[in-house]
Amino acid sequence: MLFNSGSFLEVERRTGLSTLENEDNILKVTDLNVKLQNQPILEHVNFTLKKGTTLAVLGPNGAGKSVMFRVLLKLLPYEGKVEWAEKVKIGYVPQNVAVSDIPISVREFLSIGKNEFDPKRALSLVKLNDAKILDKRLGVLSGGELRRVLIAWALIDNPNVLLLDEPTMGVDVGSEEPIFLMLNGVKKSNKMTILLITHDIHIVQEYSDFLLALNKCVTFFGKSAEIASMATQQAIYGEPVCVETVRSEG
């Protein structure tokens, strides 16, 4: 199985998962609770996200961040409400990708699940302009090249929402910022909404509009610029205090 989620191809085609009344919103999560093997993973998660914004999800390992993404994609059972705007089309890039032992080229990978596609256009979307990469095996790509190819796959069918679980996983430090610059350009040119999981406060400050701090529950939700305040730092890194009702950010 190429992706450990086992669902990368199926997810991107999910549209109109539920209907929101407010046309400015793309997503509303209400009293979300998740248990896996009878253990609570997420409790009383609430937030609303506006169209065309970037939400960074920050939290310690085991906080439930990746689980929340899979719930947003309706891949795990949950209690509560997950409501997407009408005609939502989601592109998803999971955190862990097992490609080293799979003899498949970039060109072959990009064609998976696609009826028609222009491979050079796909690469240009993510600023990979060397066409020679199309004939390379996925397993020999650098960390930065691989992440860009995965993002290109998710972008080929023009989604209006992109879910990225640690999009610079396995990428050297010098290559991280160019990837976020590229994503910021894609967001602006396509009026896209992006949700991304990260551990990097600099990325939160520079490339996201809103921050959701998660530690099995929401400990902070607000504008990313607020991350510099002591109160926000305490909410993120101190003893977790759940915020069950959060304000809607505009």
Image (cartoon, rainbow, N blue to C red):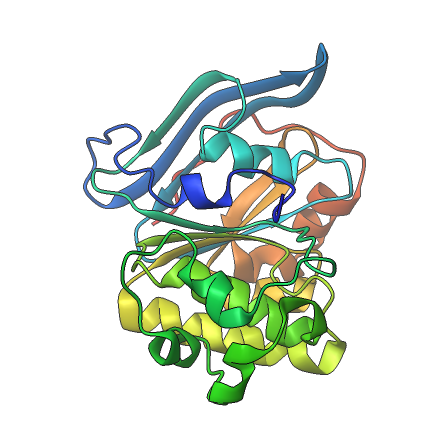
Q: Nearer the viewer, residue 246 or 88?
A: 88
Left or right, 2 with reference to 7? right
Q: In terms of image quadrants, where is residue 242? A: top right
Residue drawn at point x = 54 percent, y = 39 percent: 69
Residue drawn at point x = 59 percent, y = 49 percent: 94
**Can residue 206 be seen by looking at this rendering?**
no
Residue drawn at point x = 71 percent, y = 56 percent: 199
Q: Nearer the viewer, residue 52 or 76?
A: 76
Quadrant for the N terminus in the image: top right
Residue drawn at point x = 33 percent, y = 42 percent: 13
Residue 216 spot, x, y in % from top left: 68, 29
**Can residue 135 be seen by looking at this rendering?**
yes
Q: In terms of image quadrants, where is residue 137? A: bottom right
Q: Nearer the viewer, residue 246 or 149?
A: 149
Residue 47 spot, x, y in % from top left: 45, 35
Q: Nearer the viewer, residue 143 or 188?
A: 143
Residue 19 spot, x, y in % from top left: 23, 29
Residue 221 spot, x, y in % from top left: 53, 42
Q: In terms of image quadrants, where is residue 185? A: bottom left
The furthest residue to the front: 103
Left or right, 49 with reference to 205? left
